[in-house]
Image: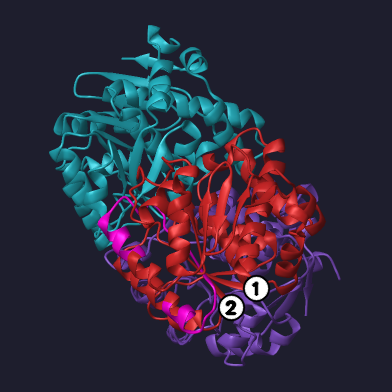
Chain colours: A red, B cyan, C purple
């Protein structure tokens, strides 16, 4: 696999850090702390705001929004829809993480409502992307039961329907827009053994989206995240020591190192 | 104290890992991330689902449920009762953690309702087990004010009433079913200095319960957790460095090492 | 800057540890786990209780309360007001963290209600203290956009209005009561790169307040927290490894070391 495909992926990291974007996140209880720490480590400015009393007012302040349905209930779902609607209205980017969408009717209905608001980027594991596209998927809690390859057609279908970017996470990620596609092979085997790392990846994609083209920003974010995982995995003794090492690696990784270390194949 | 009492405690760990059970957890905001990481580290598959809109549908998917009342409010309490009722109906195992039950009338009423659904396993500190049995207990926040020995009679009483297993956590744990009892002496002094480790222990018990006999599964889970604590404590510089070391130890500990390291006394 | 200004700051740490106070916290989802771990590490006993069904009953048990509006909604706000009202009624100390108060009308109204209940201590960053005093402040999410010096007059104004202590966090903290003021220069550059460390500082101030004079307790808590940050920063490779090192340092730091290491200037 060609390394970086002649594209300077590190520039997207450099631009994100120069902007230090405020990112509005509506995410789940498990991921909230991890996502905030990940966004601070990469150089962005996180804010977790979900209450119906203020979610639209806050969404109006932020250049980008991330939505994660992991532990939503009716009130949180309403807040997600309001915030996403506002982003859609102002044509500002937002990211959807359809956690465990195949598991319950409530999640399917919520995601149908969010999908109609055309997320700029959708990222999930293979089972979630399959279920979101209405093609089944082995919904077993929130972990992936399906391989990435099995979800490529579903991802392309979703990209066509939303006009946005869809990323399928796995050992080798698959990313597609309505017109382009890529694979990203960075990552480490310990990453699925730590909770909320998938969720927090959407926080990184969100930060990269502020003022940057969606397809390139998503690919760059995936490569950056996976490369930091590789560096952390080389130091870790297990899933516990992986976590601090991963945040350290996200903070320390330079644009230059990302450009040389990104394992991206444009399809 | 006899080591392992001629029982192969490690087989329970091996069986849990071979099954990699999906565990449905309804737990508190403080513990949610830690419990998910603990369950991933041991080889189980955690899912945190509480919303009334989906909690019964999800409970129907999972072989085991854990309930923790730590930060419950009325809506969460209703979700706990619905999910536990479904497990009781289908005679599937579920675990109760009666956090701070002695502190408020709301917690006492909620626990009375949960107790009526006959949890397969109840695990709490001595003060909580005493309060749950209606025998007082020095309720001072969520930390134990009473010694384990003071709660043994209360634990036996609860086991008789529910027909299940009751475990009292402390320097030496006490575990009882209506017909059997044991002590487990594994553990480390830093464990009570880290939040949510008691809560997360219930997540380990839950994972061990899937397809295994409740008394042996509970004893094995306590010994495993305490032994991993001993290994982490030997490396840690304090409560902060204990946490990553503990997750690493949970992931690395083998069934063989558990069988030789378990400090179990059958009474 | 004079070190410790001839005051034995370590005695406040020693007294807090001897008391091991139960601290009732109503805080945000991002901070909950971190604050509990910080309070356990310093030797206090944390309890996170927010539900309207029990918040007043629990507040009646605790010698001190901390309130943080970070992820509040209507129900949580009502619980905060009830608990703070009870503390005010019984003239027991409580601490306010006005997270991102300048961002939305909901936060401004909630803080106006809390301010009327005269918090014993308010601690926030410069932007939050400015916004709380009605003097603007560059509200950009929850991170400070203003320098500490710009918020000194606002802090003095708030202290006069509440009769309490107001602390402005930053590279050099500013603390003021209606009659006294100080600067605290302890701290480390990695602290703003880790989420919930500001929030958790209020948990430390709360623990120090139990049975101690508010101005001295606040100054001592700030110096202690910053000094632990210095020690952790000397060991950390980045924001990830800073976290366990910080909890270790909080637990290990002795009163004697605090007295010699506190960088306090009484104004």
Question: For this rendering, which residue is in front, B240 or A258?
Answer: A258
**Residue B266: image x %, image y %?**
33, 14
Q: Is residue B47 above or below residue C3?
A: above
- Residue C258 marker: none
Say whether residue C41 is magenta. Answer: no
Q: Is residue B56 above or below residue B201?
A: below
Crowd rating for badge 1 (residues with CA inside 10 Å; few <14, some 14–19, many 20+): many
CA gap, disc 1 and disc 2: 7 Å
Does any portion of residue A139 appear in the rendered image?
A: yes
Say whether residue A99 is magenta. Answer: yes
The quadrant of the image that shows the C terminus of chain C is bottom right
Q: Which residue in the structure is indicated by mark 1?
A: A21
Residue at 72%, 43% in the rendered image? A231
The residue most toward the top is: B6
* Apparent side of residue C249 relative to residue C160 in the rendered image (left or right): right
Asked if the residues shown at circle 1 and circle 2 are in contact, with their CB atoms under 8 angstroms apart, the answer is yes
Q: Which type of secondary structure does the marked residue at label 1 adopt?
A: loop
* Apparent side of residue A108 relative to residue C262 in the rendered image (left or right): left
Quarter of image, res C77: bottom left
* Apparent side of residue C24 relative to residue B64 in the rendered image (left or right): right
- The span picked out in magenta is A85-111
The quadrant of the image that shows the N terminus of chain C is bottom right
Does label 1 or label 2 sit earlier along the sequence? Answer: 1
The residue most toward the right is: C1
**Residue A266: image x %, image y %?**
65, 53
Q: Which type of secondary structure does the marked residue at label 2 adopt?
A: loop
Is there one chain holding both mark 1 and mark 2? yes
Q: Which residue in the structure is indicated by mark 2?
A: A63
Residue at 43%, 9% in the rendered image? B2
Residue at 31%, 29% in the rendered image? B209
What chain is tagged by disc 2?
A
Question: For this rendering, which residue is in front, A199 or B24?
Answer: A199
């Amino acid at each position: 696999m060609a390394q970086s495909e002649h594209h300077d992926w590190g520039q997207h990291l450099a631009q994100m850090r120069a902007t230090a974007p405020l990112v509005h996140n509506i995410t789940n209880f498990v991921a909230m702390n991890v996502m905030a720490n990940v966004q601070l480590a990469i150089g962005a400015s996180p804010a977790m705001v979900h209450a119906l009393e203020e979610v639209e007012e806050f969404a109006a302040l932020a250049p980008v929004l991330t939505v994660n349905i992991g532990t939503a209930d009716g009130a949180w779902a309403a807040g997600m829809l309001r915030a996403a609607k506002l982003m859609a209205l102002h044509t500002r980017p937002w990211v959807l993480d359809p956690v465990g969408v195949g598991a319950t009717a409530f999640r399917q209905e919520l995601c149908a409502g969010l999908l109609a608001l055309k997320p700029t980027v959708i990222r999930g594991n293979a089972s979630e992307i399959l279920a979101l596209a209405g093609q089944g998927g082995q919904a077993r809690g929130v972990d992936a039961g399906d391989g990435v390859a099995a979800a490529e057609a579903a991802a392309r279908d979703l990209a066509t329907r939303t006009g946005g970017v869809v990323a399928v996470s796995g050992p080798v990620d698959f990313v597609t827009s309505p017109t382009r596609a890529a694979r990203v092979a960075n990552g480490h085997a310990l990453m699925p053994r730590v909770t909320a790392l998938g969720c927090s990846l959407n926080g990184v994609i969100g930060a990269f989206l502020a003022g940057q083209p969606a397809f390139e920003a998503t690919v760059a974010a995936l490569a950056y995240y996976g490369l930091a995982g590789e560096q952390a995995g080389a130091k870790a003794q297990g899933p516990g020591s992986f976590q601090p090492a991963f945040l350290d690696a996200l903070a320390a990784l330079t644009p230059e190192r990302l450009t040389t270390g990104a394992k991206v194949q444009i399809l």
